[in-house]
Image (spheres, coloured by chain):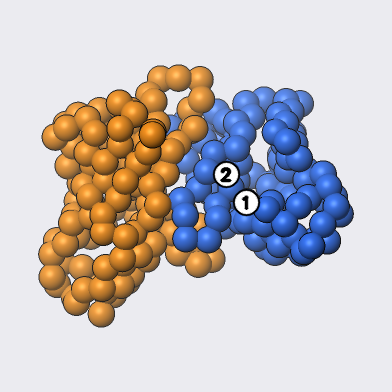
Chain colours: A orange, B blue
Amino acid sequence: EAQVTQNPRYLITVTGKKLTVTCSQNMNHEYMSWYRQDPGLGLRQIYYSMNVEVTDKGDVPEGYKVSRKEKRNFPLILESPSPNQTSLYFCASRERGTLNYNEQFFGPGTRLTVL
Amino acid sequence: EDQVTQSPEALRLQEGESSSLNCSYTVSGLRGLFWYRQDPGKGPEFLFTLYSAGEEKEKERLKATLTKKESFLHITAPKPEDSATYLCAVQALSGGYQKVTFGIGTKLQVIP
């Protein structure tokens, strides 16, 4: 089954404790991205990756890091989480260079709470 | 700055009562407009892509249309299983890359 998986699905942590949210896709997609979704603000892009070892900032990259060492994986790293990073996070992937520019496949989401 | 505004924020319909959701946008260099459906606790699910004014797409009870300033998602004879939040997004070329801007969404509730 074609899918994007994220782990963990739920996480409660404390300020300053480094964490990683994993994302994996089995569709051989070149393009992957991370979003956060907050009430009243909609989905906002954090980082995206056009291919292995190619990443770039989205609209709200501050406080986040990413890496793309393998095509299928795109982890999101919070080196020193703060309460304003409490949010619902989505990973997404799509084929690159097709006419369906944004037919993205989204993961199930990770609900993060930073105390 | 690219902007996407969806209205209404919430909509409650009786089963079988047709209606429309609106997505108005301000963007330079539109490359595509997209509709997604999001169920509670799940990630958005792709519905349609529209590329140019006048284009229409249909899927079951849903029909999406596009003008130069807005898009409509028409829901004909909705059923309770159509209850979800519907998201609109626009993709434009900005600073050399394809930027995506999402609206906040319209939460649709269809009552039996």
Residue B37 in view of the camera: yes
Q: Quadrant of the C terminus of chain B?
A: bottom right
Instruction: Give yes or no for contact between labels 1 and 2 (Cβ–Cβ under 8 Å).
Output: yes
Q: Marks 1/2: CA distance? A: 6 Å
User: Please, is residue B44 above or below residue A16 in the view?
Assistant: above
The verdict on a common chain for dots 1 and 2 is yes
User: Please, is residue B86 above or below residue A26 in the view?
Assistant: below
Amino acid at the residue labelled 2: Tyr
Q: Which mark is residue B86?
A: 1
Residue located at (45% from left, 19% from top)? A98
Q: Mark 2: which secondary structure?
A: strand
Q: Chain of mark 1?
A: B
Which residue is the extreme one toward the top?
A98
Which residue is the extreme one toward the right?
B17
Q: Which residue is mark 2?
A: B36
Task: Please rate how many residues cluster around mark 1, counting C-alpha atoms within 10 Å: few if below 14, some from 14 to 19, many from 20.
Answer: many
Q: Earlier in the sequence, mark 1 or mark 2?
A: 2
Left or right of residue A103: residue A3:
left
Give coordinates of residue B92: x percent, y percent.
51, 34
Residue located at (54% from left, 66% from top)? A40
Amino acid at the residue labelled 1: Tyr
Q: Mark 1: which secondary structure?
A: strand
Task: Please rate how many residues cluster around mark 2, counting C-alpha atoms within 10 Å: few if below 14, some from 14 to 19, many from 20.
Answer: many
Total of numbered circles in the picture? Answer: 2
